Amino acid sequence: MKITVKLFAYFRDNRFKITELEISDTTTVGDIVDAYDIARDEVGVLMINSRHTEFEIVPKEGDVLAIFPVVGGG
């Protein structure tokens, strides 16, 4: 099945902004994060179709996964 993956901020460095991805029926959000070599502890927000999600969730056909880094500052 196909989903859309969007990366934000420095996660885009040497990667992409938006891409379509072919995944299996058992692929989790965490598997996708791992496949792009993004450290899970650097992920601040995960969203599927503009709703918060978790690493264990399996996306569905046509979903849009957005991956945001932790934001620092003060």
Image: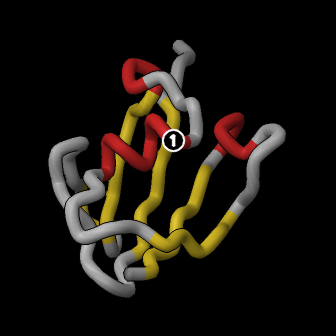
Residue at image position (45%, 80%) is 2
Relative to 54, 43 lies left or right: right
Q: In the picture shown, does residue 51 fall above or below 2?
A: above
> Toward which corner of the image does residue 61 lie, by quadrant?
bottom left
Numbered marks: total: 1
Which residue is more in the foreground, 74 or 50? 50
Taking depth in this image into account, of 54 and 59 the one nearest to the observer is 59
Mark 1: which secondary structure? helix
Residue at the (59%, 75%) spot, across then down: 20
Q: What residue lies at 31% left-to-right and 51% top-to-bottom?
A: 29
Q: How is the image coloured?
A: secondary structure
Closer to the camera in the image, 62 or 45:
62
Q: Which of the 4 image quadrants contains residue 48?
A: bottom left
Vertical placement of residue 59 versus 16, above or below:
below
Where is residue 40 shown, x and y percent of the image?
39, 26
**Residue 69 in the image, given as x and y percentages of width and height:** 51, 34
Query: Which residue is the extreme one toward the bottom?
Result: 62
Q: Which residue is mark 1?
A: 35
Q: Residues within 10 Å of mark 1 (few under 14, many from 20)?
A: few
Residue at 33% across, 58% down = 47
Farthest right residue in view: 14
Q: Can you give x and y, in whole percent of width and height, for residue 38 in the image? A: 53, 30
Judge whether 20 appears above or below 56 on screen: below
The amino acid type found where label 1 is placed reads: Ala
Q: Position of residue 73 (x, y in %)?
A: 56, 16
On-image quarter of the N terminus:
bottom left
